[in-house]
Image (tube, rainbow, N blue to C red):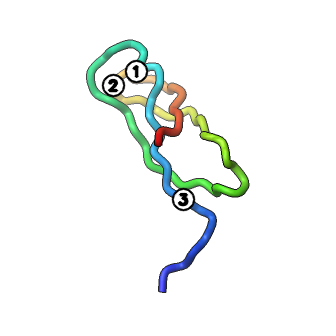
Amino acid sequence: MAKKGNRIQVILECIEQKKSGIPGCSRYVTTKNKKKTPNRIELKKYNPVLRKYTIHKEIK
């Protein structure tokens, strides 16, 4: 039987690349605890298209 917990999978997408209009997208999949962090998260991750670290925001 699967374990039921507070952790859920979320998708992070680069906001700098989205604003600039460059085709493609940089996305990462991670997990978060929905009880401890109910708000959307923002993390600095590497974007291979822009070749630098950028802010990635949680999308629905």
User: Quick check: marks 2 and 1 in contact, CB under 8 Å?
Assistant: yes
Report the front residue among 59 and 43. 59
Element on which disc 1 rests: helix
- Residue that protrudes farthest toward the top in the picture: 20
First in residue order: circle 3 vs circle 1: 3
Amino acid type for the residue under numbered disc 1: Gln
Q: Does residue 57 sit above or below 11 in this rendering?
A: above
Q: Circle 2: is it few (<14), some (14-19), or many (20+) Cα within 10 Å?
A: few
Numbered mark located on residue 49 in the image: 2
Residue lying furthest left in this view? 23
- Label annotation for residue 8: 3
Q: Give me the residue at 52% from left, 39% from top.
A: 58
Picture coordinates of residue 46, whole percent (x, y) = 46, 32
What amino acid is at disc 3? Ile
> SS at mark 3?
strand
Mark 1 is surrounded, within 10 Å at the Cα level, by few (under 14), some (14 to 19) or many (20 or more) other residues, namely some
Residue labelled with disc 1? 17
Lateral position of residue 22 relative to residue 7, left or right:
left
Marks 2/1: CA distance?
8 Å
Task: Classify mark 2: helix, strand or loop.
Answer: loop
Q: Quadrant of residue 24?
A: top left
Q: Residue at x 47, y 24 (%)?
A: 15
Q: Specify the amino acid type for callout 2.
A: Val
Q: Nearer the viewer, mark 3 or mark 1?
A: 3
Q: Nearer the viewer, mark 2 or mark 1?
A: 1
| Residue found at the very far right of the displayed protein | 36
